[in-house]
Amino acid sequence: MYIIAQCPRCGYRWWLDAAAADRRMRCRKCFRLLKVPDLTEVPEATAVLSRAKGELYVDDTGNTYG
């Protein structure tokens, strides 16, 4: 299984192996630190994004803004 990560700063997307879940990674383009969600959190995050009327931002500590 693969995870598609997208940087909230520059929008760069890349594929990650499932082993990267629940870890912090650096964007390969702008080097911003971001957290890859745990695989059990993905359905919940997808539901939140589908209900959101605007963009949703999650900071390095896991707090959500939007």
Image: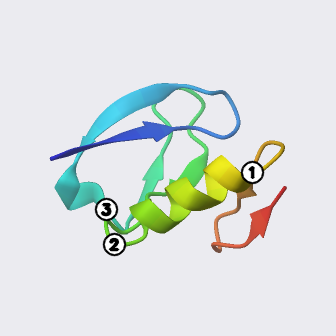
Left or right, 59 with reference to 27: right
Check the image and report above or below for 46 versus 64.
above
Q: Amino acid at mark 1?
A: Leu
Q: Nearer the viewer, mark 3 or mark 1?
A: 1
Q: Amino acid at mark 2?
A: Thr
Who is closer to the viewer here, 39 or 25? 39
38 relative to 16, above or below = below
Q: Secondary structure at mark 1?
A: loop
Q: Quadrant of the C terminus?
A: bottom right
User: Residue 65: image x %, image y %?
Assistant: 82, 61
Instruction: Give how far apart the Cα atoms at labels 3 and 2 are.
Output: 9 Å
Q: Which residue is mark 2?
A: 40
* 60 is higher (above) or lower (below) than 3: below
Work out how far the residue at label 1 is from the one at label 2, CA to CA, in angstroms: 19 Å
Say whether marks 3 and 1 touch (CB < 8 Å): no
Number of other residues with Cα within 10 Å of mark 3, as a class: few under 14, some 14 to 19, many 20 or more: some
Q: Residue at 67% x, 28% y: name it.
A: 10
Element class at badge 2: loop
**Which mark, by number, is residue 21?**
3
Q: Amino acid at mark 3?
A: Ala
Does residue 65 appear left or right of residue 29 in this picture? right
Mark 1 nearby-residue class (10 Å; few <14, some 14–19, many ≥20):
few
Residue beneath label 1, please?
56
Q: Residues within 10 Å of mark 2 (few under 14, many from 20)?
A: few
